[in-house]
Image (cartoon, helix red, strand yellow):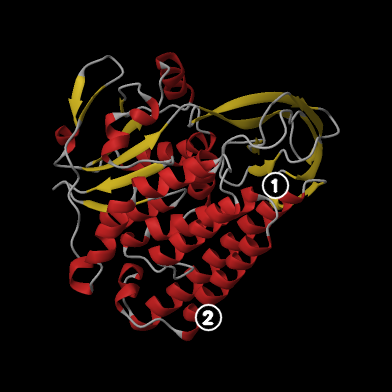
């Protein structure tokens, strides 16, 4: 489970709540950065979410300021570069927010005045540290028993991994139960849901939680906040994946977990309006990448995709981008700006896209790696993970 995916999912689940005015000022100091800095604001209308980008200039002393007019309390992303470590998440829960840090070290950033933003930053840091620790344990086991990391799930967990999973669960539940702001509860539910949703990838996770536990927490949230405007999108997100979650839960025996799901067929227009079938890409490895021009986290992932594509495009590998845009010009401009030189498809219906409905997409970026036979062999390959996976299979 990658945190950037989680936070994009959280942004999808948020909507306006509270007082009719949430205007705010964000000012701060960012060391070792020159030029512009962006603030990507999540705007939810009629149950659909898009990002609005604001840009300002960082002065010679590293100072910057945003004055934002809005009627909503939402998730915002402060972004100074497109790499995954060049963004900070915050909530406009107070009218004045101050942030300070060093562009070369994401962990150096401190948010002042906004308790909700600080708690979200804590959760992000905690989850990231737990993932790094889990990877260390798994690599150690893999080396000792001389098995590939992907096969660790077939072996008994070490006491260290069991302890880590228990500690992760305890800490996240502590954040959930102590939170006064419903947004933090949503963030914790989103974290746990993301882990459960990706469990079918046959990977050891930082927490053990099943669907019943998650739904019990959701029921508790409903009882406490029956009129919360975040709730319809949260429940819709989970319900849309209910059949998929149940399907994978029923099949996760050791024997059945080894089976590879087959990518379903679908067709969409390309950038020139020609209908292209996904079956046309069988016979090679390809990454099916769901994204959109308005999705900040998607755009942050694009440099990693470009790097992997350029390295492996002559080794029977390609990428097929499926956009959830509804504005063709914005879609085409993003393709050009980010130098995405592979095949792109979209019916320009946003979240109502045929492909989004087929795959139950409720958060982007999201991707699937498909082998030449059309089998899905991996998903949610973020950052350097795609290149590492391709190194493994395209030796």
Instruction: Tell me where residue 65 appears, x and y as whole percent.
Output: 80, 29
Question: What crowding class fits label 1: few (fewer than 14 Cα within 10 Å), some (14-19), or many (20 or more)?
Answer: few
- Depicted 112 relative to depicted 277: above or below: below
Front residue of 261/134: it is 261
- Depicted 209 relative to depicted 337: above or below: below
> Element at badge 1?
loop
Residue 12 in view? yes
Instruction: Tell me where residue 378 appears, x and y as whole percent.
Output: 30, 54
- What residue lies at 45% left-to-right and 51% top-to-bottom? 384
Q: On the image, which quarter does residue 89 sit in? A: top right
* Residue denoted by label 2: 163
For residue 182, side relative to residue 250 (left or right): right
> Element at badge 2?
helix
Q: On the image, which quarter does residue 95 sit in? A: top right
- Depicted 35 relative to depicted 230: above or below: above
State if disc 1 and disc 2 touch (CB < 8 Å). Answer: no
> Nearer the viewer's eye, disc 2 or disc 1?
2
Quadrant including the N terminus = bottom left
* Residue denoted by label 1: 104
- Depicted 171 relative to depicted 353: above or below: below
- What residue lies at 50% left-to-right and 34% top-to-bottom? 299
Quadrant including the C terminus = bottom left
Instruction: Tell me where residue 118 appears, x and y as whole percent.
Output: 73, 52
- What residue lies at 69% left-to-right and 26% top-to-bottom? 70
């Amino acid at each position: 489970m990658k945190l950037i995916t989680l936070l994009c999912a959280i942004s999808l689940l948020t909507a306006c709540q509270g007082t009719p005015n949430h205007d705010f000022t964000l000012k701060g100091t960012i060391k070792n950065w020159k030029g512009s800095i962006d603030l990507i604001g999540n705007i939810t209308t009629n149950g659909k979410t898009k990002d609005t980008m604001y840009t300002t200039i960082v002065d010679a002393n590293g100072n910057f300021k945003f004055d934002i007019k809005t009627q909503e309390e939402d998730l915002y992303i402060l972004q100074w570069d497109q790499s995954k470590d060049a963004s900070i998440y915050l909530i406009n829960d107070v009218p004045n927010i101050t942030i300070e840090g060093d562009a070369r070290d994401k962990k150096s950033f401190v948010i002042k005045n906004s308790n909700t933003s600080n708690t979200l930053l804590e959760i992000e840091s905690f989850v990231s540290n737990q993932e790094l620790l889990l990877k260390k344990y798994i690599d150690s086991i893999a080396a000792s028993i001389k098995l590939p990391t992907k096969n660790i799930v077939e072996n008994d967990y070490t006491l260290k991994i069991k302890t880590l999973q228990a500690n992760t669960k305890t800490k996240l539940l502590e954040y959930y139960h102590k939170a006064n702001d419903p947004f933090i509860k949503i963030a914790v539910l989103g974290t746990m849901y993301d882990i459960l949703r990706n469990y079918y990838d046959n990977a050891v996770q930082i927490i053990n939680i099943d669907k019943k536990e998650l739904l019990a927490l959701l029921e508790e949230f409903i009882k406490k906040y029956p009129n919360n405007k975040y709730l319809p999108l949260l429940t819709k997100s989970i319900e849309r994946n209910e059949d998929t979650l149940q399907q994978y839960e029923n099949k996760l025996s050791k024997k059945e977990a080894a089976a590879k799901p087959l990518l379903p067929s679908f067709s969409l227009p390309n950038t020139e309006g020609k209908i292209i079938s996904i079956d046309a890409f069988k016979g090679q490895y390809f990454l099916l990448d769901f994204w959109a021009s308005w999705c900040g986290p998607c755009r942050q992932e694009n440099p990693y995709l470009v790097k992997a594509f350029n390295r492996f495009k002559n080794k029977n590998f390609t990428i097929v981008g499926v956009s959830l845009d509804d504005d063709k010009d914005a879609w085409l401009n993003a393709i050009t700006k980010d130098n995405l030189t592979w095949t792109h498809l979209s019916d320009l219906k946003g979240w109502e896209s045929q492909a989004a409905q087929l795959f139950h997409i409720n958060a982007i970026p999201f991707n699937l790696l498909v082998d030449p036979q059309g089998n899905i062999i991996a998903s949610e390959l973020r950052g350097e993970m795609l290149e590492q996976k391709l190194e493994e299979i395209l030796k």
